[in-house]
Image: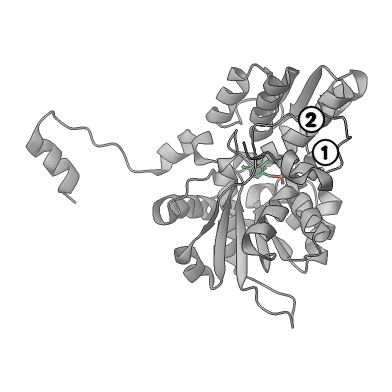
C-alpha cells in the first residue's frame, strides 16, 4: 500500500522522536481545486485548498496526527484541548485511534452540531464550559500543568509542525509556492504554521489573514472581551499565537483584515452554489476577504498572480447555518404532474 499519512510522507521534516509511533488516519493530500469563476472575480488565478477533505473534516487533523503521535511516544494516557469544535472533533478521533483518553472543553452552546456529534461519538469526555473559547484555553493550560495529560491545542508545538505540511503540499502540487495565501485566522496557529512551512521551503508568499469583524483582535490591536461571529471556528478574542502570526504576516508583506458576518455568509453561499465547494462559514472568511479587500500589496511589489485560499473545514460540520441560508425544501403530493410542477416551475 502507498504511504499516505503526513508523518510517513514528511517525517524527515517533522521534529518527532525516532521511536514515536505513528498515529494516523491518512490525513493530508487534500484537493487543490482551481476556480475559474472565483479567479475572474478576484483578478488572479485562485485555487481552493479544501481542508474539509481531511479525515475529521478540518485541517486540525494535520496537527493532531503529529501532536498525538508525540503524546503517545511520551507515554501519556490522555489528551485534552479547548476548542471551538474542530480541534475537539480531531482530538477525539486521534485519541480513539491511539487508545488514549480524550477530554475536550468547549464553549457551551457555541459549537456547530456536527463537531459536537463527532467529539461525542469518538468517545471523548465533552465538557461544555459556561464561558468562551479564551476561558476554556486558560483552564486547559492550567489543567495540563497539574495533571499528566497532554495539551493538544495549537499552543502545542507539534500541532504547528504538522500543520506546516499544508504549505509543503501546495508547493508540491503547484510546482512552486503561490504568490499569495488567503487564510482565516482565529487562534492564529494555522497562519503561523503555513508561514513556517513556506519558509522551510525557501518561499515567502504574501499572507492575507482574515478575521471576523466581531472577533478581530489582530486587526484592532487589542484583545476582544466578548468575541461574536457566526463563524464559530474563529470566534476567538485573544489569539495564543498573536505575535508569531503578526510577525509572519508583516514579514510576508501581507496584512490581516476583517470581514463582516454578511460578507462571510455571502462567500459561503457563493462557494457552495457557484463553485461547488461546501465549506464551513469560518473557512469562507478567506474567500470573503479576497472579494472584499482584493489583493493589496506594499507599494512597488508586483500583484500576486496565483493565490491559494485555504478552506479550513467542511460545510457538513454546521448544517444549521446551511439550512438557515438555503432555500426551503418543496413538499409535494405523490403524483407525476405535481412533481413536474415542483421541478419545472419558476
Ligand atoms: C481552527 C479553525 C480556524 C482557525 O485556525 P487558527 O489556527 O485557530 O487560526 C479556521 N477555520 C476552521 C474551520 C477551524 O477549525
Q: Residue at x 73, y 49 (%)?
A: 165
Q: Which mark is residue 14?
A: none
| Residue nearer the viewer, 14 or 57 | 14
Q: Position of residue 180 (x, y in %)?
A: 67, 66
* Secondary structure under the numbered disc 2 in the rendered image: helix
* Secondary structure under the numbered disc 1 in the rendered image: helix
| Residue carrying label 2 | 69
Q: Residue at x 72, y 44 (%)?
A: 9
Q: Position of residue 22 (x, y in %)?
A: 76, 30
**CA gap, disc 2 and disc 1:** 9 Å
* In-image side of 38 versus 80 (left or right): left
Q: Is mark 2 within 8 Å of ligand 1?
A: no
Instruction: Using the rendered image of the protein, determine whether residue 181 is visible from the camera's viewpoint.
Output: yes
Q: Position of residue 31 (x, y in %)?
A: 56, 50
Q: Is residue 33 above or below residue 24?
A: below
Front: mark 2 or 1: 2
- The answer to whether marks 2 and 1 mark residues whose Cβ atoms lie closer than 8 Å is yes
Instruction: Using the rendered image of the protein, determine whether residue 239 is visible from the camera's viewpoint.
Output: no
| Residue nearer the viewer, 64 or 14 | 14
| Residue carrying label 1 | 158
Q: Residue at x 61, y 60 (%)?
A: 308
Q: Position of residue 287 (x, y in %)?
A: 56, 58
| Residue nearer the viewer, 89 or 209 | 89
Circle 2 crowding by C-alpha within 10 Å: few under 14, some 14–19, many from 20: many
* In-image side of 201 versus 32 (left or right): right
Amino acid at each position: 500500500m502507498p504511504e499516505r499519512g503526513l508523518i510517513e510522507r514528511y517525517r524527515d521534516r517533522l521534529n518527532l522522536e525516532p521511536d514515536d509511533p505513528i498515529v494516523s488516519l491518512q490525513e493530508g493530500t487534500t484537493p487543490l481545486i482551481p476556480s475559474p469563476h472565483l479567479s475572474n472575480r478576484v483578478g488572479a488565478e485562485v485555487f481552493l485548498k479544501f481542508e474539509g477533505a481531511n479525515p475529521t473534516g478540518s485541517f486540525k487533523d494535520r496537527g493532531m496526527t503529529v501532536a498525538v503521535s508525540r503524546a503517545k511516544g511520551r507515554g501519556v494516557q490522555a489528551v485534552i484541548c479547548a476548542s471551538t469544535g474542530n480541534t475537539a472533533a480531531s482530538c477525539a478521533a486521534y485519541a480513539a485511534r491511539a487508545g488514549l483518553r480524550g477530554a475536550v472543553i468547549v464553549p457551551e452552546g457555541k459549537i456547530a452540531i456536527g463537531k459536537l456529534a463527532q467529539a461525542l461519538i469518538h468517545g471523548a469526555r465533552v465538557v461544555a464550559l459556561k464561558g468562551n473559547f479564551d476561558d476554556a484555553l486558560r483552564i486547559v493550560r492550567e489543567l495540563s500543568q497539574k495533571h499528566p495529560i497532554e495539551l493538544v491545542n495549537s499552543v502545542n508545538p507539534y500541532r504547528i509542525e504538522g500543520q506546516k505540511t499544508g504549505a509543503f503540499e501546495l508547493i508540491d502540487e503547484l510546482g512552486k509556492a503561490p504568490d499569495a495565501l488567503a487564510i482565516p485566522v482565529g487562534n492564529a496557529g494555522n497562519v503561523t504554521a503555513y508561514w513556517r512551512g513556506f519558509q522551510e521551503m525557501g518561499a515567502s508568499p504574501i499572507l492575507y489573514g482574515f478575521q471576523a469583524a466581531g472577533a478581530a483582535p489582530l486587526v484592532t490591536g487589542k484583545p476582544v472581551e466578548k468575541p461574536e461571529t457566526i463563524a464559530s471556528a474563529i470566534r476567538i478574542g485573544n489569539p495564543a499565537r498573536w505575535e508569531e502570526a503578526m510577525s509572519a504576516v508583516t514579514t510576508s508583506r501581507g496584512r490581516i483584515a476583517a470581514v463582516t458576518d454578511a460578507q462571510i455568509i455571502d462567500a459561503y453561499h457563493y462557494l457552495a452554489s457557484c463553485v461547488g465547494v461546501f465549506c464551513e462559514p469560518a473557512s469562507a472568511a478567506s474567500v470573503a476577504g479576497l472579494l472584499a479587500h482584493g489583493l493589496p500589496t506594499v507599494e512597488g511589489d508586483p500583484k500576486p498572480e496565483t493565490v491559494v485560499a485555504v478552506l479550513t473545514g467542511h460545510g457538513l460540520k454546521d448544517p444549521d447555518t446551511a439550512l438557515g441560508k438555503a432555500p426551503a425544501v418543496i413538499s409535494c403530493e405523490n403524483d407525476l404532474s405535481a412533481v413536474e410542477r415542483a421541478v419545472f416551475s419558476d
